[in-house]
Image (cartoon, helix red, strand yellow):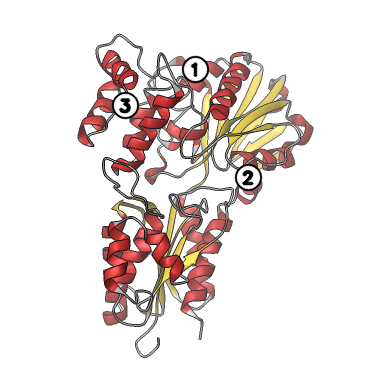
Amino acid sequence: MTDPHALARRCLDAGIDAARPERVVAGAVSLDGDALRVAGATYDLADYDRVLVVGGGNAAGRVAVALETALGDRIDGGLVVTDQPADTDRVECVAGSHPRPNAAAVEGTRRVRDLLRDADDRTLVLAVVTGGGSALLPAPAGNVTLAALRATTDELLASGATIAEANAVRKHLSASKGGRLAVAAAPARTVVLALSDVVGDDLGTVASGPFAPDGTTYGDALAVAERYGLDLPEEVRERLDAGARGEVGETPVADHSAFERVTSHVLANAHTAARAAMAEAREAGHAPLLLSTRVRGEAREAAKTHVAVAEEIRATANPVAPPAVVVSGGETTVRLGRSGDSGGVGGPNTEFALSAALELSEPGIVVGAADTDGVDGNAEAAGAVVDEGTVHDRRAAERALDGHDAATYLGERGALVGTGPTGTNVNDLRVLVVSGRGSG
């Protein structure tokens, strides 16, 4: 018999490990003489005088290390901004902060833009774009200050807005996002290496799309602010209003000439993690079922649907016979309210887990949820693994959930999953281990 708690944790670990930059870059990038191969495409280094590595995000430091391993001294330099600096030889790592931008990230982004402006048509830019890049590649535009950008970030994080909605706002307050780094790099050849943390892998949303065309407008950003009742700083509101009136230039769209020399490759995403979790389940003799890698909405509500699926499997063997492992990915959200500071500890994955624990009433189902970057909201944990016995005081658990303090409660119950910062980010990963009837 396989212990279902241990299996849930192994599935989560397998998913995170599969998305680690050193693995995905090694599997997708290789060099044979002058032929640089990236995910099936080939670039002739003889056509270029310089190769630069630039970008940002949670995984950017480790991607840079992996690229140095693959290309060695063919890399002429570069700079990435990350909250998890790595030991690099040829590409400088600047330490920024996430999820709120800081002054170091602003300065690092300025230096990235300067490197790109110096590039010419004999330069090959390897652009590293990963989850977390929206905070780690900030460049406040116009009269927008860093303080205003941080306040806006706090409002967006507390609002429950989707990542696409949040980034529609952030792109229109930035001189780096929404394709503006692609414009800075032109006429260089830019090859984007992306680790996607967004539903559907929209490269205009990953890290707020610094090298991708932008399909959103100032009007869209204002609509998000109105929809969620955002309390925006005055200079932010003024910039969005001016942009909507046509007084500030829009972000570049797909027909901009800068994108003619941009090619993008998604090296890892939610499917990468989900497939590895399913393989681990299969190895343990459990039937794997991929529910979806596009799960979204309120974390506590999504948990109820997941538990219902697991209950159906256990009761009727539909849509798969137990023992089984249900896997899902995507991005659920937590709405903190106007204050933005609940005083609690946790994030979407711990709230998902606690909500699931409140739903579970019989043995036979174990639920695990984790953020693949290793940090769930403001908790020092990636997520949690729970079962029908996790909640021992229902009223206390409900108060913790309503107070956005799920990680504190689950920590007291010994249910947290601690991975430490993983160096990757392909969003949330969830597994539900369902035992057959007659087993616990």
SS assignment at label 3: loop
Horizontal placement of 128 versus 233: left or right? right
**Marks 1 and 2 in Cβ contact (< 8 Å):** no
Q: Quadrant of residue 31?
A: top right
Count of numbered labels shown in the rendering: 3
**Marks 1 and 3 in Cβ contact (< 8 Å):** no
Q: Which mark is residue 183?
A: 1
Horizontal placement of 210 versus 42: left or right? left
Q: Is residue 63 above or below residue 148?
A: below
Residue 269 position within the rendered picture, expressed as x and y whole percent measured from the top left: 48, 48
User: Does any portion of residue 318 appear in the rendered image?
Assistant: no
SS assignment at label 1: helix
Q: CA distance from mark 1 to mark 3?
A: 17 Å
Inspect the image, locate mark 1, and give the three-letter code of the amino acid beneath it: Val
Residue 266 position within the rendered picture, expressed as x and y whole percent measured from the top left: 51, 41
Residue highlighted by disc 2: 25
Horizontal placement of 357 versus 114: left or right? left
Residue highlighted by disc 3: 216
Q: Which mark is residue 58?
A: none
Q: CA distance from mark 1 to mark 2?
A: 26 Å
Q: Is residue 367 above or below residue 17?
A: below
